[in-house]
């Protein structure tokens, strides 16, 4: 029994009690791991203002949305200066991936569907670029094609850096999530659409990706399968039949489309799985190499952080296998 009348004994007892209590508390509530440092290599997408900037008055804002696990979950609204954030691998495998996070065309979710997935890919040898793209409702001259301008430019700019960054310019994949998946799908089918005038030598390069990965992607703009929020931001409240057809990538597939890897969860209540089914059907009709994985459980927006213990946990390795099989 401790001698509580002795100062030394009292101090020792107090320290022991604190240590035991601290250990118990740590066991009950494990410390939240500090988020990794932000990548610091950032490329401006355009040498000056982006196309159609005259009259744009929105203010670019970063929102910390919070996460129950203490992970960073930032979103950028009203993008004014589109960028490519670079995450380099320790051991390059000679291929690159340009990531296009989602956000319903109202925001760009940079951490969950950008940096986190890019780090996994970089660990597997890919040189990664996370695209911060402009949003169609912010008054840009090209309207619904403003994000596509950024996507085309991103592929061209990345290819212009291939030699310096030690990857093959003929091994460039794109990966899009949700509304970013719509952007990736649009680039996959409309890579050669003339949506801006060349600004430098990088624009002499092709914008055609060598492989496309569409993650729980918004595809159709038609009533029913369409994600209403993305469609409204992209095309307004009353799109014409011609707009619906042009901005539904399943309607613009040709035999020049690169191989496509699609992932969706059957229980996605935000973007119906019909979007991926329609895109896959259109790809097969044109004999485009394609692979579709529909998982029983996963919901929407799972990225890398919400897959543990769920069927969708298989998707990253499945993508890597598909990409390798098609030379990327």
Image: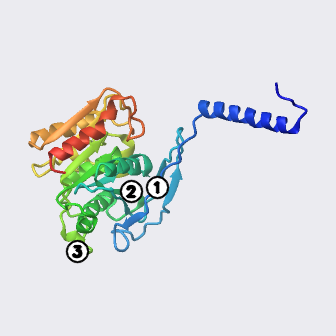
Q: Nearer the viewer, mark 2 or mark 3?
A: 3
Residue toward you, 322 or 102: 322
Label 1 crowd (10 A; few <14 / some 14-19 / many >=20): many
Side of 110 relative to 186 (left or right):
right
For residue 320, what is the image quadrant? top left
Q: Residue at x 22, y 48 (%)?
A: 212
CA separation in Å, label 2 and label 1:
8 Å
For residue 219, what is the image quadrant? top left
Numbered mark located on residue 201 in the image: 3
Q: Residue at x 32, y 57 (%)?
A: 147
The answer to whether residue 237 is seen in the rendering is no
Residue at the farthest top position: 1
Look at the numbered discs 2 and 1 and tell me whether their residues touch, using CB distance below 8 Å. Answer: yes
Q: Secondary structure at mark 1?
A: strand
Give the mark nearer the N terminus: 3 vs 1.
1
Residue at the farthest right position: 5
Residue 281, placed above or below residue 42? above
For the rendered model, the colour scheme is rainbow
What residue sits right under mark 2 in the picture?
135
Q: Quadrant of the N terminus?
A: top right
CA separation in Å, label 2 and label 3:
25 Å
CA separation in Å, label 3 and label 1:
30 Å
What residue sits right under mark 1 in the picture?
77
Q: Residue at x 75, y 37 (%)?
A: 15
Label 3 crowd (10 A; few <14 / some 14-19 / many >=20): few
Side of 15 relative to 173 (left or right):
right
Locate residue 29, reporting x and y percent.
60, 33
Locate residue 266, reporting x and y percent.
31, 29
Q: Residue at x 30, y 34 (%)?
A: 314
For residue 97, what is the image quadrant? bottom left
Q: Secondary structure at mark 3?
A: helix
């Amino acid at each position: 029994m401790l001698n509580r009348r002795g100062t030394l004994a009292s101090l020792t007892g107090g320290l022991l009690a604190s240590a035991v209590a601290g250990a118990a508390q740590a066991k009950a509530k494990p410390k939240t791991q500090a988020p990794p440092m932000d990548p610091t290599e950032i490329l401006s997408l355009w040498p000056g203002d982006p196309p159609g900037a005259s009259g744009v008055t929105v203010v670019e804002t970063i929102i910390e949305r919070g996460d129950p696990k203490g992970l960073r979950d930032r979103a950028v609204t009203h993008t004014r200066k589109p960028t490519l954030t670079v995450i380099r691998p320790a051991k390059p495998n000679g291929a690159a991936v340009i990531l296009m996070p989602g956000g319903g065309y109202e925001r760009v979710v940079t951490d969950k569907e950008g940096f986190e997935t890019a780090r996994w890919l970089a660990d597997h040898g890919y040189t990664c670029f996370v695209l911060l793209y402009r949003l169609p409702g912010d008054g840009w001259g090209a309207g619904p094609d403003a994000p596509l301008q950024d996507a085309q430019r991103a592929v061209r700019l990345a290819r212009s850096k291939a030699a310096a960054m030690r990857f093959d310019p003929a091994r460039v994949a794109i990966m899009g999530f949700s509304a970013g998946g719509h952007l990736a799908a649009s680039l996959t089918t409309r890579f050669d659409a003339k949506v801006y005038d060349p600004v430098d030598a990088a624009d002499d390069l092709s914008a055609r990706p060598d492989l496309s990965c569409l993650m729980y992607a918004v595809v159709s703009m038609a009533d029913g399968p369409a994600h209403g929020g993305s469609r409204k931001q992209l095309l307004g409240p009353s799109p014409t039949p011609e707009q619906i057809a042009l901005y539904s990538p399943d309607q613009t597939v040709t035999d020049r489309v690169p191989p496509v890897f699609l992932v969706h969860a059957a229980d996605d209540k935000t973007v119906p799985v019909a979007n991926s089914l329609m895109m896959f059907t259109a790809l097969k009709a044109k004999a485009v190499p394609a692979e579709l994985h529909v998982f029983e459980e996963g919901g929407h927006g799972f990225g890398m952080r919400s897959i543990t213990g769920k069927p969708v946990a298989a998707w990253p390795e499945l993508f890597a296998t598909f990409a390798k099989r098609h030379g990327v």
